[in-house]
Amino acid sequence: MVSRPKTSVGNWKLKRNIYISFFTLIVLGMGTFLYINQREVPIEQVFPGKIWSKPIANLPDLKGVGAPTAKNCGNCHTEIYEEWQKSTHANALTDIQFQSELAKPSSPKWICLNCHIPVQNQRETIITGLKNGDYFRPVEIPNPDFNPDMKAEGVTCATCHVRVDSQTKESYVIGGTGGTSPPHPIKIDRKQLLNRCYDCHNETYTLNESLVCSFQTGSELQATHSNQTCSSCHQPEVRRSFVKASLNKPVRTAHKHGFIGGGVPKRFDLYSDQIRLGYKPGIVLSAFKVQNDSIEIQIKNTNADHHVTTGDPERFYRLSIVGFDKIGKSIFQSETTIGQEWSWSPAAKKVNDTRIPSGEIFVWKVKPTELPVESYKFQAVHVRLKNITSNYMIQSSGYLTSPYKEKVENMKDLYPHSSIVIESSYQLKTKSRKDTTLEDLFKRNAERKGE
Ligand code: HEC
Ligand code: HEC
Ligand code: HEC
Ligand code: HEC
Ligand code: HEC
């Protein structure tokens, strides 16, 4: 029999204890890691004070109306519904560019949807929190009140007009007029209605290096000390009944609901309604001076109480001047742009900004050619999407599924990229200037393709 020395037993016990402690530590570490990693953090803790971090809570059916869909509102508010259907708001989900950007693996889809389809009833799922506070890992449960028809409605009527009463738990409509007799519950709060625009149109937020939302239209307006509201210009007044004629309601001061902006609609068939629904270029050609040794072009932001361009950082104006000889052949050309410039890596950063603040003038000086120019043609084009950007979207259409995949592949034909907003000719001999009418420009815009 061989007796094992005591020390060896001690060693073995020590080793065993070390193994156990080591193992316990690993299990504890993994547990803590899993706990932290899987722990559900409330959205408001990750995005404190951000209205867009959550949709508007599910809205129950509205008394006298039913489901609070735009289509149902349209049963009585026929003209408003018809106008809104043509708006960018109504197209905020179906927008081909939006679908393309939404599908990118780097986009936190639920955040995008909070502004583009902002009512909970429009969403398949309710987001209860974020795993470990990570905006790429929302915790989702099915939404029992999901309404697929309402989903397609984008920034629908209820976004601005319908809320739930915290006491009765019933839906009501927010109105701005008063003294009216609707069949549905109503609360009058014009200020709330008018301020609603700021929730989405006045936000700058950098989420990661490639995602930036940069809209300062609200602050730009406030800086002008103008007494106009967004709606004064984007919802022009019109005298009419609020509802269809068969309901016999009086004619009142109403507001167009086309929410026209920069004049580049989301589909070609929408061009024909831009002017009727209130489109006006923000800029005017305030001077077109041609001298022997210089051409001076002045562009004034006359009609917008915010910068032009505003909103999406990719928008800009392209100014161009072309000189023609006696037989109408182009012999001279020059171009410049007005807008923002961003560099996207390593971090999103604005590097230049030549946009025109309200009431100010952009001066463009061009050196003329020695060649025998007889006339000049000036154009200002509002560009919403560059050709290189849509090329890139077409290349990455693999992220999308039908029907948007096919739409993105054909977006050169389906998606307006830009519009001519000013065109003017100048005859050197007679020193006379002739501007093309907005109506003529928009007929041509409907036929143009690309940037
Ligand atoms: C069954 C018809 C009907 C439906 C459906 C309907 N409304 Fe109305 N609504 C009216 C009538 C009638 C008035 C009052 C018009 C008047 O007195 O001039 C009105 C008034 C309003 C007003 C203005 C109130 C004020 O004083 O400012 C708003 C805003 C409004 N409705 C929004 C909506 C919205 C949003 C929906 C859909 C969720 C909707 N309505 C659905 C009939 C309807
Ligand atoms: C805070 C609200 C908000 C959030 C969040 C938001 N958007 Fe938008 N989005 C807007 C507004 C407002 C506009 C309109 C600005 C304009 O027309 O210039 C817009 C316009 C757009 C456009 C059209 C741009 C153009 O020039 O036509 C696209 C595409 C878009 N958003 C994609 C996204 C994607 C993708 C996300 C998520 C990463 C997102 N948005 C998140 C508010 C938001
Ligand atoms: C819930 C968010 C939200 C609210 C609130 C909101 N908007 Fe928008 N708005 C958007 C989004 C998103 C777009 C762009 C959709 C796109 O391009 O796909 C947009 C586009 C627009 C455009 C069109 C720009 C263009 O050139 O086509 C105008 C004008 C506009 N909004 C005005 C307003 C006004 C005025 C209000 C307030 C009465 C308002 N918006 C409230 C989200 C919102
Ligand atoms: C982006 C926000 C927004 C959306 C979306 C919107 N409205 Fe309005 N609406 C307003 C504002 C703001 C006013 C009040 C303007 C004022 O009183 O100066 C208004 C006014 C009204 C009025 C009162 C009459 C009038 O013209 O002033 C009715 C009725 C109405 N809206 C119905 C609708 C219906 C129906 C829809 C959808 C088809 C809709 N609205 C979509 C913001 C919105
Ligand atoms: C005094 C009139 C006026 C007021 C007030 C006004 N806008 Fe505009 N807005 C315009 C005009 C004009 C344009 C067209 C600019 C252009 O592209 O030439 C425009 C364009 C826009 C665009 C499209 C982007 C662009 O550069 O074309 C958006 C989005 C917009 N406005 C949102 C708003 C919001 C949100 C408010 C309120 C905070 C507001 N506007 C207040 C007149 C106004």
Image: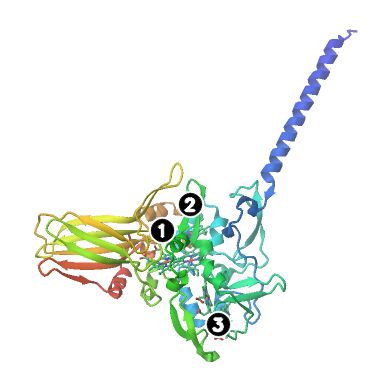
Q: Is residue 98 left or right of residue 441?
A: right
| Image quarter of the C terminus | bottom left
SS class, disc 3: loop
Q: Amino acid at mark 3?
A: Asn
Identity of the residue drawn at 46% across and 69% down:
230
Give the answer, above or below, for where 42 lies relative to 375: above
Disc 3 and disc 2: Cα gap in Å?
39 Å
Q: Of the two numbered discs 3 and 2 on the same chain, state the one appearing first in sequence.
A: 3
Identity of the residue drawn at 64% across and 60% down:
125
What residue sits right under mark 2 in the picture? 212
| Quadrant of the rendered image containing residue 36 | top right
Q: Is residue 374 left or right of residue 82?
A: left
In which quadrant of this rendering is ligand 5 seen? Answer: bottom left
Identity of the residue drawn at 19% across and 68% down:
425
Q: Is residue 302 left or right of residue 110?
A: left
What residue sits right under mark 3 in the picture? 75
Q: Along the line of sight, which residue is nearer the eye, 303 or 26?
A: 303
